[in-house]
C-alpha cells in the first residue's frame, strides 16, 4: 500500500491529467452522441416537413381541379340556360312578327274600306 501511495504521490500530476483527459473525452463523447441525436431529430423534422409540404401541394392541386371542374360545369349550365333563353326569345319574336303581319293585313283591309271613295294617304 505504501508503494501505491508513493507512486500516486510522485505521479499525482500525471494521474490527474490522465483522469482529466479521460473525463474530457467522456464528455466529448457524450456531447457527440447528443449532437448526433439532435442531427437525427433535425433530419426527421425535415423529412416530416417535406412530406407535409407535398401533401399540402397535392391537396391544393386537387382543390384547384375541383374548383375548375365546378367552374366548367357552371359555365356549361349558364350557356345552356342562355341558349334556352335565346330560343324562347326567338320563338316569342317569331310569334310577335306573325301577329304583327296579321295586324298589318287587317289594317290594310280596313284602310281599303275607309278610303274606298277617297285617295289613299301618302306614305
Image (cartoon, rainbow, N blue to C red):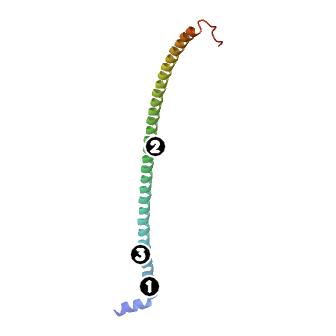
Secondary element at image label 2: helix
Q: Residues within 10 Å of mark 1 (few under 14, many from 20)?
A: few
Q: Is residue 95 above or below residue 57?
A: above
Q: Position of residue 120 (x, y in %)?
A: 63, 9
- Name the residue at the bottom extreme: 2
State the mark number for residue 64.
2
Given residues 6 and 121, the one toward you in this image is 121
Q: Is residue 32 above or below residue 112?
A: below
Given residues 89 and 111, the one toward you in this image is 111
The answer to whether 118 appears left or right of 36 in the picture is right
Secondary element at image label 3: helix
Mark 1–mark 2 Cα distance, whole angstroms, equals 71 Å
Question: Which one is earlier in the sequence, the residue at label 2 or at label 3?
Answer: 3
Residue 47, picture quadrant: bottom left
Q: Are marks 1 and 2 in contact (CB under 8 Å)?
A: no
- The residue that appears at 44% across and 62% down in the rendered structure is 42
* Residue topped by disc 3: 26
* Residue topped by disc 1: 16
- Name the residue at the left extreme: 1
Given residues 55 and 122, the one toward you in this image is 122
State the mark number for residue 76.
none
Question: Which one is earlier in the sequence, the residue at label 1 or at label 2?
Answer: 1
| Image depth: mark 2 or mark 3 in front | 2
Q: Position of residue 36 (x, y in %)?
A: 42, 65
Amino acid at each position: 500500500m505504501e508503494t501505491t501511495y508513493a507512486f500516486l504521490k510522485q505521479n499525482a500530476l500525471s494521474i490527474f491529467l490522465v483522469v482529466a483527459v479521460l473525463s474530457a473525452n467522456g464528455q466529448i463523447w457524450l456531447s457527440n452522441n447528443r449532437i448526433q441525436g439532435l442531427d437525427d431529430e433535425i433530419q426527421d423534422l425535415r423529412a416530416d416537413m417535406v412530406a407535409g409540404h407535398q401533401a399540402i401541394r397535392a391537396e391544393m392541386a386537387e382543390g384547384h381541379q375541383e374548383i375548375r371542374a365546378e367552374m366548367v360545369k357552371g359555365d356549361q349550365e349558364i350557356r345552356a340556360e342562355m341558349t334556352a333563353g335565346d330560343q324562347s326569345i326567338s320563338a316569342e319574336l317569331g310569334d310577335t312578327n306573325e301577329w304583327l303581319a296579321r295586324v298589318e293585313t287587317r289594317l290594310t283591309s280596313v284602310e281599303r274600306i275607309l278610303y274606298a271613295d277617297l285617295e289613299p294617304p301618302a306614305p
